[in-house]
Amino acid sequence: MSIKKYVHSPEKMDRRTFLKAAGLTSSAALFSACVSKEALEALLQKDFRSLSKEEIAKIIERLEAEYSQKFGKPFTVSAKEPIPNTFFGYALDISRCIGCRRCVYACVEENNQSRDPQIQYIKVLEMEKEEGIDFLHADLYYEHEKVPFEGHFYVPVQCQQCKNPPCVKSCPVGATWTEPDGIVVVDYDWCIGCRTCMAACPYGARLFNWGEPHLPAEETNPHTHFLGNRPRPKGVVEKCTFCIQRVREGRYPACVEVCPVGARKFGNLLDKESEIRYILENKRVLILKEELNTQPKFYYFYGT
Amino acid sequence: MRISGMKLGSIAPSFASILLCLLLAAGYLASAYRAKIPQEDKNGQENIQIPPPPLTEGIFPCSQCHAEMETNFTRRKLEDFHDDIVFQHDQENRWCLDCHDAENRDMLHTASGELISFEESFKLCGQCHGPKLRDWKAGIHGRRTGYWNGSKKYLLCVHCHDPHSPKFPKIEPEPAPRKPGKIK
């Protein structure tokens, strides 16, 4: 038979023997490959939402040790739950933004994004004032000596934290979901890297780790959250989480604090006294690609 | 057993497919997640801090020089001192003493003559820029740092806008992202 030339063994092997051998050898390979108990535990880890508090605590202990060793400084990984009665919203003043990209790099530093290959959650789009908001003719790669550039305005785009998120619906394994405080998160240990969510997101807000993320140890932020800025492995999708590690402690996201013109506003949509509610009630507000019914909680407004 | 005849290359795919099946099956079994919400009080009352005004070092108190000087009320371009100030703020209609008080050199004054300290200069600005003052108080205009549910830090108008030339200056942008074509 022609198949003979592909079989290297001099003796003929029947199907039964092959399966037996394959089964035995793969289980042997499994155990020899996972010599350490930690690695085996990581391999068999359940998805985040199925884990008990005790299991989460154990995993966190393992991750903290792993990251601390890898980057040579003490890392903390939190699994802090949502603050009761919060539902986060974000607003960005298009009339103020000057396109300086300070937010892009503050985000990279806060959230431990890979420097090379480059991963950035915020994309600042330059648009022409004469054209209005027009994604077809927007420029992500603008370079000017000084900004704002004459006749142009800027629309930074990041995860819109949709109330009706197409990415969550598209994930075949349930590795991404909306938390009770409205933040769409990813379980990096559960993501299979199929990138279906990236195809589903109409805002280009999800990014894939094509290569091993390169993160200089001295530039890492060791203050992390399990569902947020902890170091990611190669082959998983990541995204903006409103700085979950900060906002669940009551702080503003990094991009809000760094913005030199104060164009970025953040708060609790359920709190009538919040800045975000003031904007929704008093300013001209728009959302991107409204016709897709994604229902973003990321609003753009004109503060003037 | 004839394991010796097997090559690792033929084992790896079967190992991977078993793993993939396991992962997929577990994914579909993922149960609905309901985080238990801990009972916590909302953080205390809103507490707002404003840093001191950004006065040029050594220039304040103004009275250290002006106390000895006679006030010249004539509207003019300054030449001997303060000549580095570029004044582009309704310059056709106003000059120094419309905001700086001639009697109390370390104070400002509103149009009605009410004295205002440099720490509260936003009251002076708000005389003309009412809607901006309203939005600033609501936290919509200007940069706020701190806690969305607690103490916050505001900046004064003059931290970002030079009161003599208030238009926000153009700044150098951070580098553009790498174009996909340039990624190795």
Image: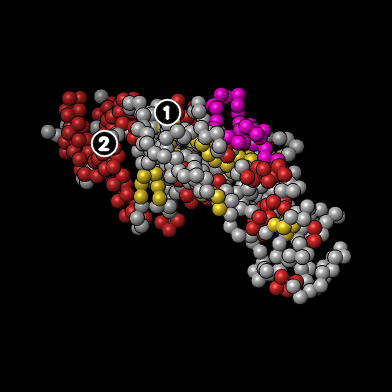
Residue B91 coordinates in the image, percent (x, y): 83, 56
- Residue highlighted by disc 1: A171
- Residue highlighted by disc 2: A44
Is B61 contained in the magenta span? no
The residue furthest left is B1
Residue B161 coordinates in the image, percent (x, y): 69, 54
Mark 1 neighbour class, 10 Å CA radius: few under 14, some 14 to 19, many 20 or more: many
Among the 4 quarters of the image, the one containing residue A196: top left
Q: Is residue B1 left or right of residue B78?
A: left
Q: In this rendering, do the residues under marks 1 and 2 share a single chain?
A: yes
Q: Which mark is residue A159?
A: none
Numbered disc 2: what chain?
A
SS of the residue under disc 2: loop
Identify whether B87 is placed above or below A66: below
Is A288 contained in the magenta span? yes
Q: Nearer the viewer, residue B140 or B30?
A: B140
SS of the residue under disc 1: loop
Identify whether A264 is placed above or below A199: below
Numbered disc 1: what chain?
A
Point 60% across, 24% down: residue: A291
Point 43% across, 52% down: residue: A221
Point 76% across, 61% down: residue: B100
> Alpha-carbon distance for marks 1 and 2?
20 Å
Among the 4 quarters of the image, the one containing residue A171: top left
Which colour assignment does the render follow? secondary structure
Q: Mark 2 or mark 1, which is nearer the start of the sequence?
A: 2
Image quadrant in which the N terminus of chain B is located: top left
Identify whether B144 is placed above or below A289: below
Q: Which residues are magenta?
A: A277-304
Please say whether residue A112 is visible from this viewpoint: yes
Q: Is residue A28 left or right of residue B172?
A: left
